[in-house]
Amino acid sequence: MPNSSWPKNDYYRKTQIDQNGNFSNRSNEQQNDRVAETQKCLDRSQITQQKEVLSSHQNIDDGRRRKAALMSFLIWTTTIALHLLSWGYLVILGLTALLSVQLMRILFAKPKLPPKPLSEENATDWPYISLLVAAKNEEAVISKLVKNICTLDYPTNNYELWVIDDNSTDRTPVLLEQLAKEYQQLNVITRSPDASGGKSGALNSAIPLIRGEILGVFDADAEVTPDLLRKVIPLFVRKEVGAVQVRKAIANAGLNFWTKGQSAEMALDSFFQEQRIAIGGIGELRGNGQFVRLNALKECGGWNEQ
């Protein structure tokens, strides 16, 4: 490096006067000692940080174990007590009656009608949306997904797509690079081989980069209708709504016995989720087709990587 590029007060450029009155540069030994001391401080800092992280994870695991042990103890104690007590069957009958009433409420509740889709009249007021996809070795479906999402019936300058390549070993990175040149909404994040946290970690890596106030999460093999955003976004007009889970369906439900079974399972799950919300309960978010406010997600600390 040229001499002029070093600051005048740099440690290694200082001079000192020896006992004979001669000027001399600091010795290499002093420089090495200073570097070694700095490295030791850095090492100690890293070790401390690692211990804090491990301690935090250990506390979380210990807390979960204690809760699980306590719940198991209560269940077994209650079960044994009901068998030993002569009036135990009355408690069981009472609980059965309460559960039956709750089941009737769920089955016959009337869900609220969804709001009308966004209209072209107020297109300038449509919010900015960020859509996220975590992908690992998805060369068979990633191109179809990107083309599907990047051609939605929504202004192209009002939404973006982030695909997080979680260290794929197939042609997924190559395909994403080609697609990014074709679609302006597409942004690609490539995770390193030592990245952790699975799908949650991949999604969390995009949070500092996204622009949307509402996020949508999809699997790499998802397929959405062109008007999806125009139907989902009006649900967020109510400020108390923090998240929305869209209904999922199997595209090839009639293919065989297994696809028919999965289609029935998803339909039943969607029904009970909708009915549970109708009676004042809380719905559950799935890994595919969830929408959430960015502020609400940050308040929860992001997606759980444990």
Image (cartoon, rainbow, N blue to C red):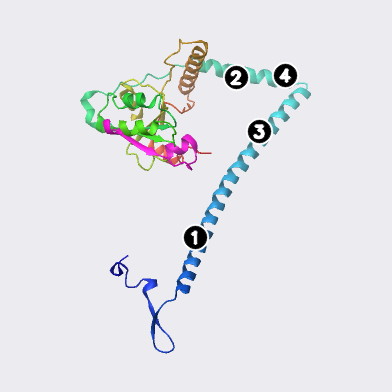
**Snapshot quadrant of residue 93:** top right
The residue tagged 2 is 99
Counting residues from the N terminus, which is met first, the one under dot 4 or under dot 1?
1
**Snapshot quadrant of residue 186:** top left
Q: Which mark identifies residue 89?
A: 4
The answer to whether the residues at label 2 and label 3 have Cβ atoms under 8 Å apart is: no
Is 105 above or below relative to 18?
above
Q: Which mark identifies residue 71?
A: 3
> What is the CA distance from the residue labelled 3 to the residue labelled 4?
22 Å
Given residues 198 and 139, the one toward you in this image is: 139
Q: Secondary structure at mark 3?
A: helix
Is 155 magenta? The answer is: no
> What is the CA distance from the residue labelled 2 to the residue labelled 3?
20 Å
Give the number of the mark in front: 2 or 3. Answer: 3
Is 206 above or below relative to 226?
below
Q: Secondary structure at mark 2?
A: helix
Q: Residues within 10 Å of mark 2 (few under 14, many from 20)?
A: few
Say what amino acid the circle numbered 4 marks.
Tyr
The answer to whether the residues at label 4 and label 1 have Cβ atoms under 8 Å apart is: no
Counting residues from the N terminus, which is met first, the one under dot 1 or under dot 2?
1
Q: Residues within 10 Å of mark 1 (few under 14, many from 20)?
A: few
* Bounds of the magenta segment: 180-204
Please indicate, yes or no, whether residue 58 appears anywhere in the rendered image.
yes
> What is the CA distance from the residue labelled 4 to the residue labelled 2?
15 Å
Q: Residues within 10 Å of mark 4 (few under 14, many from 20)?
A: few
Q: Residues within 10 Å of mark 3 (few under 14, many from 20)?
A: few
